[in-house]
């Protein structure tokens, strides 16, 4: 056996440093999420996080070199968490029922936002002054949810469950839809793809109106029922169903 005072190997030292870095980065992100809730994205400060960690600010900068980098890390983490919640909800829904699967996606988005309004504001609220998200790091996670919605619509279309809306579009809009098809490797026709953008804007817009308190305190007594009816109105215009449409006021167990 080697002597008790044998220095640690390079591999052991490297693993220890990697573990310490992972712990420190996790703590910085945890405090970043807390500060989002208390100060908002514009109020994030690495110096304040360093004070809470009990270290000098230079120690934090070794792991997260700037406020913008912290915002980027929080964005990627938020988009990823939301995407995982959406995937789990869709995967748990009935495979053969496109209506139920897409409704599950919509309800998962709303539930995630209601449970974490500060991170929803970071993802879908007003831009943070002075910050520009790096496309090479945020576009893929940021489009994960819309990609899942388009995939569910594609499955419905392939099964003949989408309504046949032959739409004549302005050239500029048709070009935009072509770009979307290229980005998401989609073959959806213009009418279905356009309906998909309506579905997306309804889900995001309705969720944001509720999360940001734009309905007021007494306009709708049951916002979850309003949301279900709004999504149902869009889906009823997009999908054919072989069975009765479920009452959108009765949300799945995972929705709040």
Image (spheres, rainbow, N blue to C red):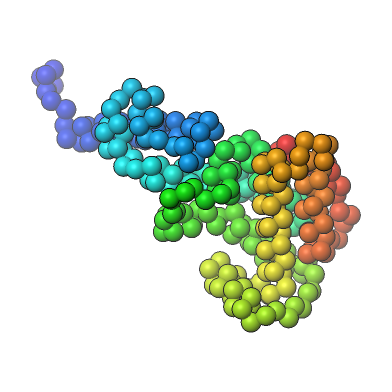
> The C terminus lies in which quarter of the figure?
top right
Q: How many marks?
A: 0
Percent x, y of residue 145 = 59, 54
**Res. 158 in view:** no
The answer to whether residue 35 shows anywhere in this view is yes
Residue at (71% x, 59% y) in the render: 199
Considering only vertical position in the picture, is 245 above or below 255? Answer: below
Residue ID at (86%, 60%): 242
* On screen, residue 151 above or below 43: below
Q: Position of residue 178 (x, y in %)?
A: 59, 76
Q: Residue at x 31, y 42 (%)?
A: 65
Quarter where residue 119 is shown:
top right
Q: Position of residue 88 (x, y in %)?
A: 62, 45
Q: Quadrant of residue 37?
A: top right
Q: Residue at x 53, y 68 (%)?
A: 183
Q: Left or right of 89: which side holds 71? A: left
Q: Nearer the viewer, residue 192 or 89?
A: 192
Q: Residue furthest front?
A: 129
Compared with 175, 221 (above or below) is above
Quadrant in the rendering for residue 30: top left
Q: Which quadrant, please, contains the N terminus?
A: top left
């Amino acid at each position: 056996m080697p002597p008790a005072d044998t220095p640690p190997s390079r591999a052991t030292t490297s693993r220890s440093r990697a573990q310490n870095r992972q712990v420190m980065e996790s703590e910085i992100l945890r405090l970043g999420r807390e500060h989002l809730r208390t100060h908002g994205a514009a109020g994030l400060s690495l110096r304040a996080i360093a004070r809470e960690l009990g270290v000098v600010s230079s120690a934090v900068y070794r792991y997260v070199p700037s406020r913008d980098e912290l915002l980027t890390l929080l964005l990627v983490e938020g988009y990823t968490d939301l995407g995982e919640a959406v995937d789990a909800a869709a995967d748990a829904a009935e495979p053969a029922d496109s209506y139920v699967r897409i409704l599950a996606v919509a309800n998962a988005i709303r539930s995630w936002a209601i449970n974490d309004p500060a991170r929803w504001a970071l993802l879908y609220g007003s831009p943070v002054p002075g910050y520009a998200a790096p496309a090479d790091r945020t576009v893929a996670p940021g489009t994960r949810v819309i990609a899942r919605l388009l995939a569910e619509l594609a499955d419905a279309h392939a099964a003949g469950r989408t309504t046949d809306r032959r739409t004549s579009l302005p050239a500029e809009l048709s070009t935009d839809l072509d770009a979307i098809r290229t980005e998401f490797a989609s073959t959806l026709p213009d009418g279905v793809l356009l309906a998909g953008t309506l579905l997306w804007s309804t889900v995001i817009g309705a969720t944001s109106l509720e999360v940001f308190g734009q309905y007021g305190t007494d306009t709708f007594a049951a916002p979850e029922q309003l949301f279900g009816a709004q999504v149902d109105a869009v889906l009823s215009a997009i999908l054919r169903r072989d069975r009765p449409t479920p009452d959108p006021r009765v949300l799945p167990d995972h929705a709040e």
